[in-house]
Structure formats: structure tokens, C-alpha cells
Amino acid sequence: MLLVIENVLSPELLEEINRCAMDGQWIDGALTAGSLAQKVKSNLQLDDNTELAQQLQDIVLEAVATNSLFCSAALPQMIYPPKFNLYKNGGAYGTHVDNAVLSVPGTGQPMRSDLSATVFLTDPTSYAGGELVIETEYGAQEIKLEAGDMVLYPSSSLHQVKPVTEGERLSSFFWIQSLVRDTQERSMLFDLDQSIQGLAGAADQSETVTEEVSRLTGLYHNLVRRWSEF
Ligand code: NI
């Protein structure tokens, strides 16, 4: 499942992130890549070990963790502290797959990457290139979103960022370990939850509809109970 979630960040938060990020300490992105990914990665990454980076992480983390569509789709159990990267002057990240197991900074706790997320932070009309290309079962999808929008996709997907040939592209990215490890199970739960929300929000609510919504909600929770892992 590849899902775009719009307006995860308000214009005010976007402005703050963009303003602060420019004062940040940027390091060569290749330093943080595995040996294979290193060869195809040319971008800059905000040094995570700074107070500024941690402030920006908190802003993104709070915005996604309170986004109901994100929670419904990802069923997050653990979210890796968001990172920030900057592509300019032809910077790109060739085809790769993200690491399957990550070590959470600070605690060293291992986590599995089930889902990858990218939050676009720059007005797409201000730079050329920089599309995130994700291989899916229906072919490659090119993603270039409005500032403040995010894309969520399975971490098992091959993906790349095309060269940014004009302007600069700032984004935030992170990984999620989901309560439900299997992509298809998670995707079915998302569909069911969205239908329940749609029915529950419908204007003409007869008693029968209300009762059936309760039954479907029960079914949803029973499936989560069956499929979730800790
Ligand atoms: Ni990646």
C-alpha cells in the first residue's frame, strides 16, 4: 500500500521547520548509509546530535502521531525519530531498500522497519527533479508532493530519489514498526477502519446503522487483536 496523506504539517510549522533547518548542521548523507547504499547516495543530512535537529524531530513526530489517517494506516508501535535531508546541485539517492532492522538512537533498542515515510517540506514549484520513485506491484510511482504532505509506503519497496537539478529539496523521513507486520493485513484493517469512520460519520443514522457500526467496530478490534504483535 502506498498512501499519500495531505496537510500533515500546517503552514506555520512548515515555515518554522524551513527557517530553522537552514541554520542547522548538515553532514554528508553517505556517512549514514550502509556500504551498498553509500555508493548511490549524494545528499546532505541534518546532524541528529544537535538540539535543533531534536526540536525539528519533535515537531514532525507530534504532527504525524496525532494524524488520524496516519495512525489508521500505519498502526504504529514504534516510530524512528524523524531525520531530515537536503538535495541540491544534482544530489540524488539511487535505487535502494531501507534497512530491515534499525537501532533506535539513544536507547539502542532494535526496531523493524515495516513502513517508510517521507514528509515533503519544500514547495514543489521551487525545485526541479527530486521525485521519490517507488516500485510497487503496479509499476513505479513517481511522488512529488506539496510541502506539508507525506507519503507512506512499505519499507520492503525499492525506491530512489531522482537528481535535484534546480533549487533545493528539503524533506523529513522516518520508519515505523507497525503493530501489524503483514502489509496486506494492515491494508485490510485500514480499509475496514475507513469504511467504519465513513458510516459512523454519515448524516442519516438509523438505529440499525448505529448497531451495525458497533458490530463492525467490534470486528475491527478483534482482527487487530488477532494480528497484532508486540
Ligand atoms: Ni530509502
Image (spheres, rainbow, N blue to C red):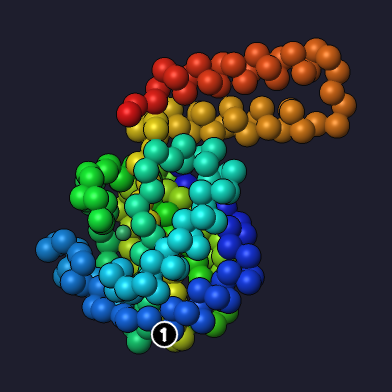
Q: In this view, does 29 lie to the left or right of 123?
A: left
In which image quadrant can residue 206 be found? top right
Q: Which of 23 and 124 is in front in this view?
A: 23
Q: At x 38% / y 48%, what residue is drawn?
A: 79
Residue 217 in percent (x, y) is at 62, 20
- Residue found at the very far left of the displayed protein: 35
Q: In this view, does 71 lie to the left or right of 200?
A: left
Is residue 105 positioned above or below 17 on the image? Answer: above
In which image quadrant can residue 88 be found? bottom left
Residue 180 in percent (x, y) is at 39, 31
Which element is circle 1 on? loop
Asked whether residue 76 is in view, the answer is yes
Residue at image mark 1: 23
Type of the residue with mark 1: Asp
The quadrant of the picture occupied by the C terminus is top left
Q: In which quarter of the image is ligand 1?
A: bottom left
In which image quadrant can residue 28 be found? bottom left
Residue 173 in percent (x, y) is at 39, 61
Q: Which of 173 and 82 is in front in this view?
A: 82
Q: In this view, does 107 lie to the left or right of 9?
A: left
Q: At x 64% / y 70%, what residue is drawn?
A: 11
Q: At x 50% / y 16%, what residue is drawn?
A: 222
Q: Nearer the viewer, residue 100 or 164?
A: 100
Q: At x 20% / y 65%, what residue is drawn?
A: 33
Is residue 193 positioned above or below 4 on the image? Answer: above
Q: Which of 157 and 212 is in front in this view?
A: 212
